[in-house]
Image: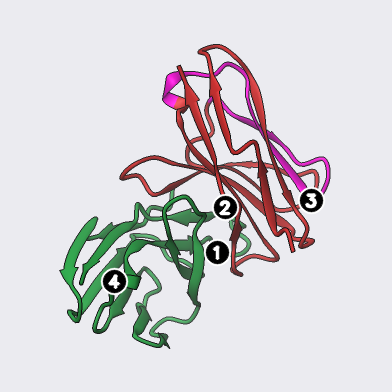
Chain colours: A red, B green
Amino acid sequence: NAGVTQTPKFRVLKTGQSMTLLCAQDMNHEYMYWYRQDPGMGLRLIHYSVGEGTTAKGEVPDGYNVSRLKKQNFLLGLESAAPSQTSVYFCASSYVWGTEAFFGQGTRLTVV
Amino acid sequence: TQLLEQSPQFLSIQEGENLTVYCNSSSVFSSLQWYRQEPGEGPVLLVTVVTGGEVKKLKRLTFQFGDARKDSSLHITAAQPGDTGLYLCAGGANAGGTSYGKLTFGQGTILTVHP
């Protein structure tokens, strides 16, 4: 059972470069989330989706875009990476509102 | 914006001691969850509480949801080194609101239990 899979697991970018983080879940979950985790900041919500074709902004959406073209995939894009986007990124999914969120193992991104 | 404030941010105790972690907000949450995260891993759910005043027990862990559904606490009895980790509370937005589906986390409490 794969659950939630994030790729890549590690990445180093130069300032100004772009990249896409992929999150895939095989549990037929409706809800998907992208968070970033920085020391002392817990998990901050970047964007989320309540179903295929829908996206919504979280607390820290600036500098990121997302797409949910297929129910099982949620993509997070950085168009022009900045050092402030150095962080660990977590994707999560849940079946319906208020139920357990299952997390991927994270992507450690460093922007130099 | 729905904010969750956790306290304390750091907790370092000896094996066998009791502890309580608090999660407070000015907003009402329809549900509140507690997660535990180990280094290099994603958070894993411990419990979900949905009813004001609800108390749930999970072995040595006791979770309580405030009557007004704005706050919660996690109490650990006789802590063990295996309890060491990052504890996070998370609140689910009210159904039907503009933030429907949003899951907001507190900043976490880093617990270290020394043998």
Q: Is residue B87 above or below residue A72?
A: below
4 or 1: mark nearer the eye: 4
Looking at the image, is mark 1 or mark 2 earlier in the sequence?
Answer: 1
- Residue marked by disc 3: A72
State the quadrant of the C terminus of chain B.
Answer: bottom left
The numbered mark 3 sits on a residue in which chain?
A: A
Q: How far apart in space, not on screen, are marks 4 and 3 (Cα)?
A: 37 Å
Q: Residue beneath label 1, please?
A: B94
Q: Amino acid at mark 3?
A: Gln
A69 over B20 or under it: above or below = above
Query: Residue A6 location in percent, x, y?
Result: 65, 44
- Would you say B66 lies left or right of A8 here? left
Q: CA distance from mark 4 to mark 1?
A: 36 Å
Highlighted range, magenta: A63-84
Q: Is residue B112 left or right of residue A109?
A: left
Q: Amino acid at mark 4?
A: Pro
- Identify which residue is drawn at 68% across, 49% down: A5
Work out whether disc 1 and disc 2 sit on a shared chain: yes
Q: CA distance from mark 3 to mark 1?
A: 25 Å
Specify which label sits upstream in the sequence, 2 or 4: 4
Q: Which residue is mark 2?
A: B99
**Subunit under mark 2:** B
